[in-house]
Amino acid sequence: MTVLILTCDEDVTADMVVVHLNASGVPVVRLDPADLTGSAALSGEFVHGSFRGHLSSGGRLVSIGGIRSVWVRRPGKAAARAAEPSAWLTEESGQALYGMLRDCGARWMNEPDAAHRARYKPWQLRLAQRCGLPVPATLITTFPRAAREFAARYPDLVVKPVSGAHPQDPPLAVPTSRIPPEADFSAVAHGPTLLQRRVAKRADIRLTAVGAELLAARKTTLAWPDPEEVDVRFTASPEPWRPAGVPPRVAESVRAYLRAAHLAYGAFDFAEDGDGTWWFLECNQSGQFGFVEVDTGQPIARTIAEWLARPASGEPVDAGGPGTAAVG
Amino acid sequence: MTVLILTCDEDVTADMVVVHLNASGVPVVRLDPADLTGSAALSGEFVHGSFRGHLSSGGRLVSIGGIRSVWVRRPGKAAARAAEPSAWLTEESGQALYGMLRDCGARWMNEPDAAHRARYKPWQLRLAQRCGLPVPATLITTFPRAAREFAARYPDLVVKPVSGAHPQDPPLAVPTSRIPPEADFSAVAHGPTLLQRRVAKRADIRLTAVGAELLAARKTTLAWPDPEEVDVRFTASPEPWRPAGVPPRVAESVRAYLRAAHLAYGAFDFAEDGDGTWWFLECNQSGQFGFVEVDTGQPIARTIAEWLARPASGEPVDAGGPGTAAVG
């Protein structure tokens, strides 16, 4: 039984996990959908009520029925590197590949539909609320009057994008920014705006969830930070990330969130306030973890490898088997 | 409690359903995401563990908590008609709108993730097989050798797109075509190709499923059809669609398919062979129904309206209520 990794060639984060899979002798096939229909190929036959499918990538052939788990890391756009790329070829290749892999019986990190849904920020905020995680008061609106009323109730606000990142290539992360007093909210009418009560934080928390394992890291906020800099991603800080314990109630809520979202992996960002409360900011279902592992030494890559390698219940533990074969 | 219809202005199929909803006094709000952030607006507030959201469209304001059902018909691209449209505004507006509507408690026709998944043809074929629907032998491949071997076993083949329609604007439907004998399959290596055993059909079947209601229509194949014309969508035929009964075993399988796919609506295409067997070709989760209703007189629009208007279990039957209000 094979672990299939969908990612691009230059993915060092995937490399970190592959090292552990190789060390434990688990067969791995790495496939970049961008390589369809060049060095990657596929075939699936639906005959007499049954299905037999195969993928080939980098000279290795894997039976779709022999895939134990699929890790969707940073897959390229389907057929992007084809000899004659086109929107039509991308559509056809993506439909063929993901259409065969969907419901193939493998465990997913993360299942594509769950991953898609998990990106919606308003949905994240409601789910976090329902799971008992504290969420800073938030407004998403195109009504200037609603923005003004909200700012009157919560004078210390930040503004951030509703979606994750600006859709340019490569994507541009838009920083969270403070709203000056007496801001003019009339421009809110031109685009949905996300306003959130600023948490006076003493630390940033990154909690990486891998299946049932929760690995948290904490970065102390500088004693006299620049009051304009609220986004840890854009702040040069001498403070490293350090391992942190997860409060039991937070752990319970995070696990409930992952169950409801059908996610096997999630990178949660929290802001820790002066009382030690962890305020939910977001959960990125494909969030990076390399920088945390480097700072903290937490075994995130190994934990992911173990999750991917784990046999399904009832499946023999023997890691090898007929799932893979060299292409003759 | 209000029915929310996400569609563009020029949607006469939606008009057919709205007529029935209006006749039964059910409040309807029609919103085209393309009108964000012009004549459509939204607001959602997440405060103290609760959520309150509103949409406004065409001068009507609806509480998101007061939405009974959402019909995703032919929604425009979010913010496409904004004063200054951009990919960024589309992303932000789509995330805000669909993020608030997801998990809002309303019934969906169809739920967005289920609708997305339902478009994958390989996934459709496997699900149809599992639900007991006969599927003509099919191969999807980029291996020329696999195509040649398949053609040796099934000499009478058609080729069709893996995905639904060519992604130009407006989308171009690609017809199903017969494969000539002695075809050269070497080009298969350049793009996934779907080959399917041709069903020697005596009729086309369109089965429109609306919740538990199944409305089937049948169009007899001409006695001496042009042997090259296999795609009913591209064939001028004097034969009308006529109402047809659904064989009980097909009905059972179709309902199993809809349950597994989490679809409230699906337009199934079958080919009926000389023995009367219905061979599954595809299920289009957003398939048109107007042409069938016009030919057969079957009450598809009314059935959709009834499904949309039906109260959730436990909800009072009173169709009006506090869900909508005119914008002052």
Image (cartoon, coloured by chain):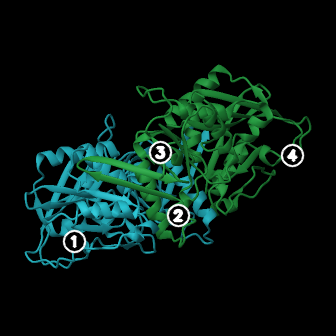
Chain colours: A cyan, B green
Do the numbered discs 3 and 2 sit on residues whose CB atoms are within 8 Å?
no
Residue A280's label in the rendered image is none
Q: In the image, what residue type sits under mark 2?
A: Gly
The chain letter under disc 4 is: B
Measuring from the top left, give residue A292's x and y in whole percent. Answer: 20, 66
Measuring from the top left, give residue B251's x and y in whole percent. Answer: 62, 25
| Secondary structure of the residue carrying numbered label 1 | helix
Which of the marked residues, 4 or 3, is nearer the chain's N terminus? 4
Q: In the image, what residue type sits under mark 3?
A: Ala
Can I make out residue A158 in this image?
A: yes
- What residue appears at the point 72 percent right and 47 percent down from the top-left corner? B151
Q: What is the C-alpha distance between the residues marked 1 and 4? A: 63 Å
Do the numbered discs 4 and 3 sit on residues whose CB atoms are within 8 Å?
no
Tell me whether marks 2 and 4 sit on the same chain. yes
Which of the marked residues, 2 or 4, is nearer the chain's N terminus? 2
- What residue appears at the point 60 percent right and 70 percent down from the top-left corner? A85
- What residue appears at the point 73 percent right and 30 percent down from the top-left corner? B298
| Secondary structure of the residue carrying numbered label 4 | loop
What residue would you read off at disc 3? Answer: B325
What residue would you read off at disc 2? Answer: B38
What residue would you read off at disc 1? Answer: A232
